[in-house]
Amino acid sequence: MIKKFFTTLTVVCCMVVTFTTYTGNAATSYTYYKVQQGDSFYKIAQKYKTTITTLKTLNKRTSDRLVVGETLKVPVTAKTTTGKTNSKVSITAEERKLLAQIVQAETGFSEPFAGKVEVALVILNRVKNPAFPNTIKGVIYQKTKAGYAFVPVRTGKLASIQPTKQDYAAVDRALALFPTDQRHSLYFYNPAVTKDRWMLSRPVTIRIGHHVFTR
């Protein structure tokens, strides 16, 4: 009877629960992990390819203390189907944070929420476009003749950016819209700053705040 109980508990702890959050930097999908003897946040983070910060945020922890036998929420990959046949974008906790960072770096506090969502959609649309790298990190850190595709990466600013709750919410909204996105925006620029003729010649998909989005 006891053996059956623990077998059932193990199964329950491995069940995957999916949710979407608009209020924090936890992953959009998680499963449960039972803490073992010798475990630490570092070891668990390594096992699930995430960060200590992500684990603590997901479990609302501030200390490093773990109790053997307790269950923790740990992030798992959430897949979003793209418009390309048999093509998917895998969104991990780290990629979600990276998306939120680029959104904050490019929009700051001066652009409306819709503009933040569209910037995230630009990244996702590039991932599924064969003209660009096929991963979120690859797109954001893509090298060009000018150095990098995005100015915050070129200047080194991106790594120190701390996304806000609104930035994470914009990423989550973009992920929800992405499978049926009809605009397919691939670029964006501020017309008051950009003088590049090629960029200015691109077909406009939408104008939001100070940005013009194109494809």
Image: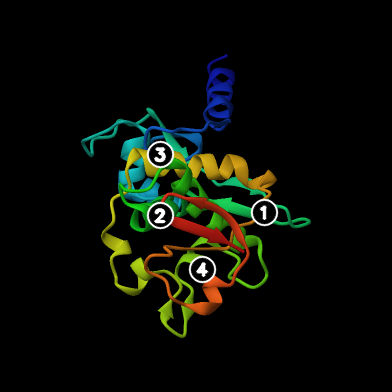
Instruction: Tell which tag, 3 or 2, sits nearer the viewer.
Output: 2
Q: Residue at x 67, y 54 (%)?
A: 88
Please report whichever mark, 1 or 4, sits nearer to the chain's N-terminal start.
1
Which residue matches tag 4? 138
Q: Are marks 2 and 1 in contact (CB under 8 Å)?
A: no
Which residue matches tag 1? 88
Task: Please say whether residue 40 is visible from this viewpoint.
Answer: no
Q: Residue at x 50, y 39 (%)?
A: 28
Residue type, label 3? Ala
Q: CA distance from mark 3 to mark 4?
A: 22 Å
Please provide percent x and percent y for residue 152: 34, 66
Which quarter of the image is occupied by the C terminus? bottom right
Which residue matches tag 3? 26
Residue type, label 2? His
Which quarter of the image is occupied by the N terminus? top right
Please report whichever mark, 3 or 2, sits nearer to the chain's N-terminal start.
3
Please report whichever mark, 2 or 1, sits nearer to the chain's N-terminal start.
1
Residue 47 shown left or right of residue 109 in the figure: right
